[in-house]
Image: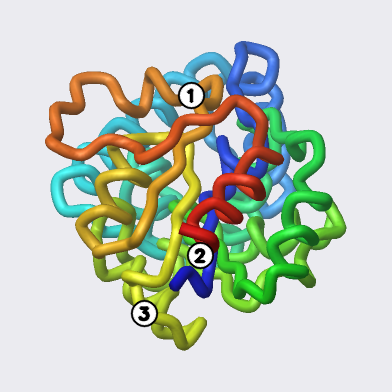
Amino acid sequence: MITAVMFDMGGTLEDIFVDEASEREAIRKLDEMLRAAGLDPGVDKEELRKRVNEGWKRYGRFRDSCNVELKPIRIWCDYILSDFDFPAEKLEPLCEPIAHMWEVTYYHRSLRPRVAEMLQGLKDLGLKLGIISNTAALYQVFDSLEEYGIRGYFSDVTLSSITEMRKPQPDIFYVSAHQLRVRPENCIYVGDTVSRDIIGSKRAGFAGAIQICSQLTKQKDAGVVTEYGPDRKIEDIYDVLPIVREYLTA
């Protein structure tokens, strides 16, 4: 019996993509935030961009090798801005504001159409709803849910930045199920990637895994070889509702 549905955030409930304009705006804001705190990078914005990109590559190699998410303070101090000799006492308090800014500026984000109607339909079926999201900021997902007006639908929001576990680790799925007081075999997960969402929920023993592709799906799933695939693929997020109804009547 299905008792809960969990969702990925970026790429699933939200459409999300990056372009040159958003990347350069994120660098501009980063430079502005650093200088306002008395931290002069000592390089122009193009060099800052190159160094930040290298920092993200370093962090990505660590993160993807072990599926561990560090706190923003460690991501930005030890990886992204490690090439700069910034005093820790000045940089550390700035790390979460920078992480939040980066998530909402580097990425173009917008709520998919009919998300609220779909969520209300699931709630009307008596189901518990949750979020399981990989994110490098502590509060951005919560704030975005509030801004979209859908925070109240979710009984649990489980983030990699808080648990320090990243999808596809099954444990982050178990944490969310435990917090919702449901069993994994009674849950359905909805996400945009095989590499994180489908593999992770399948390994955790979820009853179903639904994939809706985003503009970043191909990039995130590049080179992935797995025995797992989605049970269903959809193009409209609203289609989660009739699919879940099918599970409930099967």
Image quadrant assignment for residue 109: top right
Residue ID for mark 3: 183
Q: Position of residue 162 (x, y in %)?
A: 45, 71
Residue drawn at x 33%, y 44% as measured from the top left: 198
| Residue 44 position in % (x across, y down) | 57, 19
Q: Could you say which is closer to the camera, residue 48 or residue 67?
A: 67
Mark 2: amino acid: Glu
Left or right of 76, for residue 19: right
CA gap between label 2 and label 1 equals 30 Å
Q: Is residue 49 visible?
A: yes
Secondary structure of residue under mark 3: loop
Whether residue 123 sits left or right of residue 2 in the image: it is right
| Kind of element beneath mark 1 | loop
Residue at image mark 1? 216
Which callout, 3 or 1, points at the residue further toward the start of the chain?
3
Coloration mode: rainbow
Q: Which residue is mark 2?
A: 92
Residue shown at the point (64%, 78%) measured from the top left:
155
Q: Amino acid at mark 1?
A: Leu
